[in-house]
Amino acid sequence: MPLRMLLTIQNIWLGANKMTGDIERPWDYSPDNWIILEITQDGKTYHKVLSGWSGGYLHGDHWRMNSGIKSIDEVEGYYYIHGYSGSIYKCNKESEMIRMNISGIFKQLQDFVKEVKISTILDKYITTS
């Protein structure tokens, strides 16, 4: 594959600025719904985002959990949740809820880890812009 084609694919995948060609990375994931979990294991408490996307005719529902919350930016109706792995979740404030796409994994986590609950700890991490 020619180098020019590879660079074009890379720019599309990473979100290159169409005017300058600079790589932008405002967020990695923008879920349809999400919750913050508080997981206590071996005496340590962790906060993670459990997020879901609703599927359609060709693709089913799917979910994702981040590596842990490092910080949260609150900007114009969204929370930008930064994870320890470097990922960023753009979460609509009005989409904080459990739907079928994450309810099953939430139940499995409760059964397996035992000390898992939905957290209201947003204020601990939020920085406003």
Image (cartoon, rainbow, N blue to C red):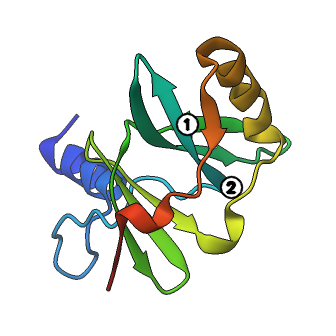
Residue at the spot 37% in from the left edge and 36% down from the top edge: 67
Picture quadrant where residue 37 is located? top right
Give percent across and percent down for residue 54: 76, 48
Q: Going 60% across and 55% down the picture, which residue do you hit?
A: 31
Q: Quadrant of residue 91?
A: bottom right
Residue 113 place in picture, x, y as percent: 59, 17
* Marks 2 and 1, how far apart at CA: 11 Å
Q: Nearer the viewer, residue 82 or 113?
A: 113
Label 2 Cα neighbours within 10 Å, binned few <14 / some 14-19 / many ≥20: many
Q: Quadrant of the C terminus?
A: bottom left
Residue visible at 18% across and 71% down in the picture: 21
Residue 32 x, y percent position in the rendering: 68, 57
Please give the label number shown on residue 64.
1
Q: In the picture shown, does residue 98 fall above or below 121?
A: above
Give the secondary structure at mark 2.
strand
Tell me the element at label 1. strand
Q: Which residue is mark 2?
A: 33
Please report the residue visible at 61 percent of the width from the left and 72 percent of the height from the top: 93
Q: Amino acid at mark 2?
A: Asn
Can the viewer see residue 58 in this picture? no
Say which amino acid is labelled 1.
Answer: Arg
Return the x and y of residue 61 as percentages of the image width and height.
Answer: 75, 38
52 vs 126: above or below:
above
Side of 30 where 44 appears, left or right = left
Q: Work out whether residue 13 or residue 46 is closer to the camera in this orientation and state it.
A: 46
Query: Could you tell whether 73 is left or right of 117 in the image?
Result: left
